[in-house]
Image: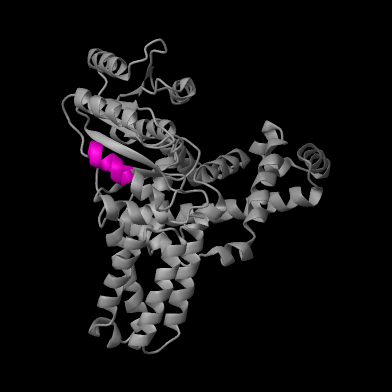
């Protein structure tokens, strides 16, 4: 869960405030102290913590909170506003050139995730903006980085320009640019070398590449788990290269929040993308307001909707709508819907985006059991014959025994799954009928 510890602490602070009918200046000071400690424990840069708590306190002790009918809620709103501001304010959209080649330089320390991030961004922009991307391997010091980029390119069907015999990244970059111009690529993403720490050789090389390529974007890739150490890294890269933005990676891990909450304030450069998992689709635009909501335990329904829209296959959705209309929804469709849901992430990841959900609630819901149930259902359906999937009504007692044996489950599990399928089918049939009536103008659904 992203920022799990910080999220839990903020929810505890807010819970205490909501229980009070009125807030005194002492209450606000006490809450501000708790917020300060929570941020410092999350490894947020101390200068950032000082500025943030000062801004919250100054606004909170005014009439805005103390004379409010719901002071607890008003205080929470102030914290949310200041958190959003701290994270960059508003979404900073990428600027693309319409004529010519968009050139992105990926820079950062070794191990931050530059190579994978380069592939993720290429894949995302190809899908969303219809770019024709070219990945360029300019990390001449680590053969494994070149191999990794080549493998990722093949997996995504995105071409990779490389030359394992050439040891000068400037030569590779120049030839790659010529190749991109000749072949009509309009997006070139350069995977540059990294070091375990910043040194003069690395920076000189990156400065040379910048002067040669005149990139559209210089994106600093920062490991989201590094905490406030990321501030020093970002500062130095920004001083020497004047980066245009930051990409935070590994936000699916044990992220305390230090990097996300420090890097924008200290560099003045916004976070443009965040990496949220290991899959090549696990990258998102960074929305400061949505991230503030998630950190403070208010959920992120808008990102969940965006994710669903990006992952759902439109052709399959139309086919499913037709099946619902003609009442032909079968176990193949049921399995396909489950797999599309799994593409969105684990049940825990999805629940995390819902307002008010915290670690304790997720434990109470037993997410592991729910994940296990999904895998069991998939195993049962895969143990059926094609005819059984199309016509579940023919599955008698002997067939159920065979399916249970083939899926490593019991007959009771098979019965439970089939009952669940029938209930889902009935519900979807009702939804289909309601949508049909709504389209004919007989009535409108509450959300239409």
The reply to whether the magenta stretch includes residue 245 is yes
Which of the pair 255/378 is nearer the observer?
255
Q: Is residue 145 left or right of residue 209?
A: right
State the predominant SS element of the stretch in magenta. Answer: helix
On the question of residue 234 being in view, the answer is yes
Outermost residue, left side? 99
- Against 42, residue 176 (above or below) is above
Q: Position of residue 214 (x, y in %)?
A: 19, 28
Q: Residue furthest top?
A: 165
Residue 269 included in the magenta stretch of the image: no
The quarter of the picture where residue 401 lies is top right
Residue 132 figure quarter: top left
Q: Is residue 95 left or right of residue 150?
A: left
Up-down relation of residue 145 to residue 426 (above or below): above
| Residue at 47 percent of width and 63 percent of height | 41
Q: Position of residue 82 (x, y in %)?
A: 29, 66
Q: Residue 11 vs residue 63: left or right?
A: right
Q: Quadrant of the C terminus?
A: bottom left
Q: How is the image coloured?
A: one colour
- Where is residue 412 shown, x and y percent of the image? 79, 52
Task: Confirm whether residue 298 shows in the render.
Answer: no
Residue situated in front as seen by the camera: 116 or 282: 116
Residue placed most toward the observer, 178 or 164: 164
Residue drawn at point x = 18 percent, y = 24 percent:
100
Which region is colored magenta? 234-246
Relative height, residue 371 to residue 314 (above, below): below
Residue at 41 percent of width and 47 percent of height: 307
């Amino acid at each position: 869960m992203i920022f799990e510890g910080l999220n839990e602490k903020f929810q505890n602070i807010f819970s205490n405030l909501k229980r009070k009918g009125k807030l005194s200046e002492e209450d606000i000071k006490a809450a501000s102290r708790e917020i300060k400690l929570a941020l410092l424990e999350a490894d947020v840069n101390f200068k950032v913590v000082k500025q943030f708590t000062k801004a919250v306190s100054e606004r909170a002790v005014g009439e805005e909170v103390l004379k409010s009918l719901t002071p607890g809620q008003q205080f929470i709103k102030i914290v949310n506003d200041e958190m959003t501001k701290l994270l960059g304010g508003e979404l900073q959209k990428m600027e693309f050139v319409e004529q010519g080649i968009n050139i992105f330089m990926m820079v950062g320390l070794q191990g931050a995730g530059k190579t994978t991030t380069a592939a993720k961004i290429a894949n995302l922009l190809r899908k969303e903006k219809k770019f024709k991307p070219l990945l360029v391997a300019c990390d001449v010091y680590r053969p494994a980085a070149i191999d990794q980029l080549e493998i990722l390119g093949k997996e995504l069907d995105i071409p990779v320009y490389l030359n394992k015999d050439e040891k000068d990244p400037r030569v590779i970059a120049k030839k790659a640019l010529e190749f991109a111009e000749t072949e009509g690529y309009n997006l070139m993403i350069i995977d540059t070398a990294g070091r375990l720490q910043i040194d003069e050789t690395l920076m000189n090389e990156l400065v040379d590449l910048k002067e040669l390529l005149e990139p559209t974007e210089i994106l600093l890739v920062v490991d989201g788990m590094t905490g406030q150490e990321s501030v020093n890294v970002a500062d130095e890269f920004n001083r020497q290269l004047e980066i245009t933005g930051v990409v935070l990676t590994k936000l699916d891990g044990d992220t305390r929040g230090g990097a996300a909450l420090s890097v924008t304030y200290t560099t003045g450069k916004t976070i443009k993308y965040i990496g949220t998992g290991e899959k090549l689709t696990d990258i998102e635009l960074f929305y400061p307001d949505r991230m503030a909501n998630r950190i403070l335990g208010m959920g992120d329904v808008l990102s969940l909707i965006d994710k669903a829209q990006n992952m759902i296959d439109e052709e399959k959705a139309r086919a499913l709508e037709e099946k619902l209309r003609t009442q032909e929804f079968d176990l193949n469709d049921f399995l396909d819907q489950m797999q599309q849901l799994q593409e969105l992430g684990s049940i825990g990841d999805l629940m995390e985006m819902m307002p008010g959900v915290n670690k304790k609630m997720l434990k109470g819901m037993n997410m592991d059991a729910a994940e296990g149930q999904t895998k069991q259902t998939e195993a049962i359906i895969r143990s059926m014959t094609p005819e059984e999937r199309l016509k579940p009504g023919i599955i008698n007692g002997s067939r159920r025994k065979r399916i249970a044996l083939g899926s490593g489950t019991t007959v009771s599990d098979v019965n439970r799954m089939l009952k669940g399928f029938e209930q889902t089918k009935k519900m979807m049939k009702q939804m289909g009928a309601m949508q049909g009536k709504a389209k004919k103008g007989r009535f409108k659904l509450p959300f239409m």
